[in-house]
Image: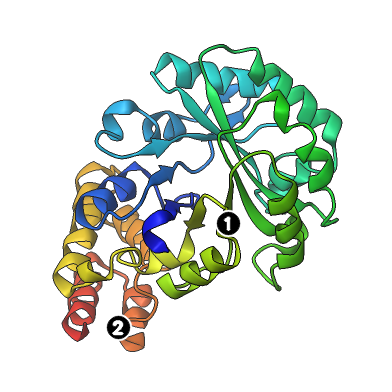
Amino acid sequence: MITSCQILCAPLQGFTTHVWRSAHARIFGGIHNYYSPFMRIEHGKLMNRDIIDVKPENNQDVPFTPQILACAPSDAVKMVQHLKDNGYEHININLGCPFPPIALKHKGSGMLPYPQEVEELFSALKSISGLSYSVKMRLGWQDADQWRNIFQLMDLITPTHIIVHPCTGKDQYKGNLNLEAFDEMVKVSHYPLIFNGNIQSLHDIEQIMLKWPSIQGVIIGRALASDPALPCPEKASPENYRKFYLEIYNHYAATLTGGEHQVLKKMQSFWEMFLLQANRKCRKAIKKATSISSYEAAVESLFGTL
């Protein structure tokens, strides 16, 4: 069942950057496609970090789709045109981000209660030739039935697939998934669906595909960030975990310009998701390190326990 299932990598803002994606694809793999953390317009301009993250030269040999987040059609068109000019032919539309500072501006899942705004967005994107789209969404913002009106608009962009996290934006990442709603989506969708949410293991993926054999696959985020070997357990070795870590650490040590403190903070944030099941005492020492030397010593101690 797993062999017929696409396993995708969910975007995690500030974590699954091109550095992480490239290292993961080379060392572990097992992912059908990676998605960028969403691009957005701030003060009328693309953010420089987003421009760097989606540069084609930073995503070579990685199956990769850039993702955009916007409410205003003009902002979406500006991002999509930038991506098209850089050679991209497929773009993912974020209608799922649950964080209130985003959602309360009618972006991400906060756009789902407003089908007229979604229609205007889709219509603007449809007008750009030579591109295909996919959608990442939730059931709604506060109402788990809001997806119904959005599904009626999908023909505007004929998405290659729809990634569904079957909960509301208000749920954030807490509470139970609404599997009954997803079951209904599977029955009525004209487009391939991909399941998102609370996947922790290959066994979970097998159970999802047994329950909904017609869906295209699954997408995993936080569990993959913790265990990058999740899709390919034969590569789950201390050597590969260390190699993966060092590739990311060495990149930031060589490119960040804010000195050791900036590198330390960047890598401590990396460990907030990486190897969550590793030695608790060592993870605590990494979090509390105040210098690169104490940090590196703590990391070495952790790898020594694997």
Circle 2 crowding by C-alpha within 10 Å: few under 14, some 14–19, many from 20: many
Q: On screen, 273 above or below 85?
A: below
What is the three-letter code of the residue carrying label 1?
Phe
Q: On screen, 176 above or below 87?
A: below
Can residue 258 be seen at all in this image of the molecule? no
Q: Along the line of sight, which residue is nearer the eye, 152 or 172? A: 152
Write down the residue under mark 2: 282
Q: Position of residue 281 (x, y in %)?
A: 33, 88
Q: On screen, 295 above or below 261?
A: below
Q: Residue at x 32, y 50 (%)?
A: 20
Write down the residue under mark 1: 195
Is 231 left, or right, of 302 in this rendering? Answer: right
What is the three-letter code of the residue carrying label 2?
Cys
Q: Quadrant of the C terminus?
A: bottom left
Q: Residue at x 76, y 56 (%)?
A: 184
Q: Quadrant of the N terminus?
A: bottom left
Q: Along the line of sight, which residue is nearer the eye, 156 or 210? A: 210
Q: Residue at x 45, y 22 (%)?
A: 89
Is 186 left, or right, of 59 in this rendering? Answer: right
Disc 2 secondary structure class = helix
Q: Along the line of sight, which residue is nearer the eye, 228 or 145? A: 145
Q: Position of residue 6 (x, y in %)?
A: 43, 52
